[in-house]
Amino acid sequence: MGQDGQVSDPRALAEALARAGVAEVDISARRRAEYSSDASNYRVVPAAVVRPRDDDEVAAALAAAREVGAPLTARGAGTSIAGNAVGPGLVLDFSRHLNRVRWVDPEARVARVQPGTVLDDVTAAARPHGLRFGPDPSTHSRATIGGAIGNNSCGSRALRYGRTADNVVELDLLTAAGDRLTARRFGRDGLAAAGPVGQALDAVVAGNLGLIRTEFGRFTRQVSGYSLEHLLPENGADLARFLVGSEGTLGVVLDATVRLVASPAAVALAVLGYPDMPTAAEATAGLLPHEPVALEGMDARLVEVVRARRGPAAVPDLPRGGGWLFVETAGATEAEAVAAARRLVADADCLDAAVVTGPAARALWRIREDGSGLGGRTPAGEPAWPGWEDAAVPPERLGPYLREFTALLADHRLDGLVYGHFGDGCVHVRIDFPFAFGRDTKPFRDFMVAGAKLVAAHGGSISGEHGDGRARGELLGHMYSAEALAVFGAVKHAFDPGNVLNPGILVDPRPMDADLRVPLARPLRRGLAYAYPDDQGDLSMAVHRCVGVGRCRADNTADGGVMCPSYLATRDEKDSTRGRARVLQEVANGTLVRGYRARELAESLDLCLSCRGCASDCPTGVDMATYKSEVLYQKYRHRPRPAAHYSLGWLPRLARVASRAPRLANAPLRRGMPSRLAKRLGGIDERRELPEFAARTFRQWFRERRAPAVSPTAGPVLLWVDTFTNHFTPQVGQAAVRVLEAAGYAVGILDNPVCCGLTWISTGQLDTARRQLRRTLDALGPALAAATPVVGLEPSCTAVLRRDVTELLPDDPRAAQVATATRTLAELLTATPGWAPPSLAGVRAVAQPHCHQHAGRGWAAEGALLAASGAEVTAVGGCCGLAGNFGAERGHYDVSVAVAETALLPAVRAAAPGTVVLADGFSCRTQLTQLAATRSRHLAQLLDDAGPGRAGDS
C-alpha cells in the first residue's frame, strides 16, 4: 500500500478479487474517476470499484482487500457530504445489485432491506399498508438505506419520526475479519452476547461509563463521533443503534431490519415570515409544543436563486420576510391539518404567514430538498461548497448560535445561504470558501476550526446528521475530551484492528484540507467556443458545479422532469450527469484522465443525449449538453470526424440539396441495400428508419400560397423556418401560419434560408455553428430593429436562438436581442390581447414536452393554452430517446429505445383509444412513429384542426 492508504498496484487487487470469484470488478481510469468523489469537496481515487451481486461476493471482496492490504469503503448512492463514501482502495457500490426490499411485515411495522435500497423504494413497498420509512433526507429519492445507516441520516421529518438510529431494529453485517454479526438490542444479555467483538466492546463501555454518560447523547442531533450512549446498560445495550452513524468504519452491512411508521392522513404547510434567519431561529423553540411533523428554516435569498434559475412561476407566493419557517402539520383530514397550521400561526409572532396545501406545498418542499444544490452559488454568483454543512445545537440555543455564526462568516469574509432542520437545531449552509484552482486552503481551515469552537461553546455537535467524514473528523477534539477520543480508538480496534474499513474517518482522521478536489484542479479557459458567462469563462469552474448531490440518479419523470434519461436506461454511474462531470473534473485535474481526446472522456460522454434536462433539473445548474459540445469541438477541431458528424451534423446543407429532387433523394432511404449502405457510410444504426423529404418544402408552399383576405389586427410576426419544418414536416409550418393569421398576425418569413446551427452544435462543430448564427443575426436584423416577435416551431432550434446564440456569440449585442425576441407559438398566442384558443373540449391528449423547452422557459404557456381550450392533457416527463442525432447514431439505438420506454411509450400505450399524442419536437414525433406506430401532432396542428381561435384587437 502506498502513501495515505493508496493501493500501489490496482491490478494486484483486481487479480485477488478475480481469484475470490468477484465478477464486476473495474480498475479502469474512467470508472475510478466516477467514484473518486461523493457529494463532498474531496477527491480520493480508488484502486478498484466492485458492484457485488450477493452477500457472498461482499465477503469475497472483503477477503481480497485484506489479502492485498487494501482499504475498503462501502458506498450507496454516493451522496455523502462529508467525504465518507470515498476511499483509496476498494469501493463497494451496493446500489447496483443489492437494492431490494426483501419483505415488509405490516403487523410488526418493520421491513427487511438490502443496503443498496433507495429510501423511496422502501417507502413505496410500505405504502400499500399506509406505512413509510420515517427518515427523509433531502436525497431520499436516490440515497440508500446503507448510506442512511452509515451517516445516521435524519431529514426534515425526523422531528416526528426520529433519526435513522431510532428506526433500525437489527443489522446483519460483516466485521473486518469477515465474520457475520447480528447487531440488535441485547438488553439484559449485555454486549458480550454478540461474541468476541461484543465482549471487547463491553469492556470498553464498562471502563468508561461516567465519560459516556456525561459526553454523549446530550441532545437528539449529537451524531458526531461514535454514539456510545446506545451501548449503556440503561439504554438496552443496543448494538444496532450504536452502529448507525459509524460511517462504515466498524462493519459492512448486508441486511437491515428497519421500523416503519404510519403516514399522516393529511398534511398542511404553514409558512412563517421573519425579518431574518436568526429571528426565525429564535421563534423555533416556541413552536415545538404544537408537535409539528417538520419545522424547517429557509433563507429568502435561496428562494431568489430558484426564481432566477427556474423562473418566477417555480415559486408560489410567499409571506413577507427575509427568512421563513416551513412548518408541516398533520391531521385526519386536510381540514384538521389546516386548522392545526392556523393554530400554530397564531402563536408564531411572525411578520406574515400563509397556510398552503397540495401542489403549492409540494413546490415549496422541492425547493427545500434542492437546498444543497441551489445553495451551490451565493447571491453574488460565487461557488459555495459543503464542509461546514450540518452543525447542530440544542434548539433553545439556535437563535444565539445563528447570530454568532452569521458574524463569524462576516469576520472571515465568507457568505452562505442558510437553511435546515430548525426544529432539531440543525443548520445547513454552503459557504463560498475560496477554493480557487491551486490556491492555499488556509482560509477553509481557519473558518472550520473557528466554527467548531463556536458550536462547542453552544453545547452543539459539529455534525447533526451527515457524519464527520474527511470534512470534520479532525475537529472532534473541539467537541470531545481527549479521553473520549481515546475511547473511539478502542472501539475501532475492537471491530477493525487492521484498519481496513474506511480508514482516515473518525479515528486517526485525515487532515480536513487534504484531498480537496478543486485546489488540485486547473482552469480550462484557453480556446473555448462557449463563453460560460456564469462561470467566469472557465469550463473547469462549470464542470465543478457538480458537487455530487446525485439528483441525476433519481427518476423524476413522474413530476415532469427529464434528467438523466441515459442513467434511467442503464442504471450505471457512467451514464449519470454526475459520473460525466467527475470524468470532466479529472480532465481539469490532469493526472487520471488526460485531455479532451482521452478515451475515458469519450466513453463517458457517449450516451449523453444532449437533452439538456440537467440544465434545469440539476439544482447546481450543470449543463452537460454544452460541455459535451465543447469537448467534441476541442477533440475534433481541424481533425477528421466520425461519419455521423457529417451525415447528421451537416443535415441542413444536405437537406437543401436533397429537396431539389426529393423523390430521387428518398429512394436510397427506403429499405434494401441502398438504405443499408447509406446508413453504414453515414454512421447511422441500420435499425433506425430515416425520415423522408417532403415533396414540397414549406418555403415553396409559403411563396406560392394566396395572401389572406383578412387584414391583420395583431401586427407582424416572423416565423422561424427551421430545417425540420421546411424539409420534412411542412404541414406543421402550414398549420402554424393558419393559426397565427386567425389570431390576427401578419406572418412573414426570411427571404433567404438561414440556419440556427443546431446540428453543428450537437456534433461540436462550433466554428461552423457560429458562422451560421452570424448569418442568422444578419438576416434577422430588420425584424429586430422593428421589434417583431420571432416564433419558433421546433423547440431545439428555438432553444438555440434563446440561449446558445448568446454563449457562442457573447460579444454581439444582437444575440441578446434575438434571445429576447424569440418565443414559442403558445407563448405568443397566450400573450396576444383578446385571443382565446379554439375549443378542444372533449379532447384527451398525452403531451411530450420537449427536453430543450423544459430546460429553458418550460412548458407553462403550452399547458395554460391547452387548459384554456378545455382539453384534458397528461404531460409526460422524460425524453423521447431519439434526441436529434443521438438515437440515429450507430451504437445508440438500444439506449434510445430504453429511454423512450422510461415514460413516453408506457404513457402512450396506456392512453385510451382516440387520445391525441402531442409532441412539438420533430425527433419526438419521429420516435413515436417508429416505436409506437403513433401519428403524433404538433400544437399548431392541434389548434388548426380545431378551427380558428378568437382573434385579438389591434
Image (cartoon, rainbow, N blue to C red):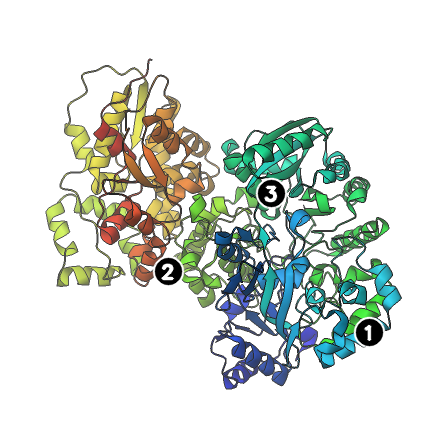
Given the current orientation, which residue lies at the most extreme right position? 210
Between residues 45 and 589, which one lies in front from this camera angle? 45
Residue 658 horizontal side relative to residue 789, left or right = left
In the rendered structure, are the residues bearing label 1 and label 2 in contact, judged by CB atoms less than 8 Å apart? no
Residue 23 seen in the current view: yes
- Residue placed under numbered mark 3 in the picture: 368
Q: Quadrant of residue 832?
A: top left
Q: Give the SS element for disc 3.
A: helix
Q: Residues within 10 Å of mark 2 (few under 14, many from 20)?
A: few
* Callout 3 amino acid: Arg
Q: Position of residue 157 (x, y in %)?
A: 63, 47
The residue that disc 1 covers is 204
Q: Is residue 431 visible in this depiction of the protein?
A: no
Say which quadrant the N terminus sits in: bottom right
Residue depicted at x 51% and y 73%: 52
User: x, y (%) of residue 907?
Assistant: 33, 47
First reached walking from the N terminus: tag 1 or tag 2: 1
Q: Which residue is mark 2?
A: 639
The Cα–Cα distance between marks 1 and 2, rounded to whole angstroms, is 67 Å
- Badge 3 or badge 1: first in the primary sequence: 1
Is residue 903 placed above or below 936 in the rendered structure? below
Find the distance from the CA under tag 2 to the CA under tag 3.
Answer: 47 Å
- Helix or strand or loop: what does disc 1 sit on? helix
| Amino acid under disc 1 | Val
**Do the residues bearing badges 3 and 1 touch, measured as CB atoms within 8 Å?**
no
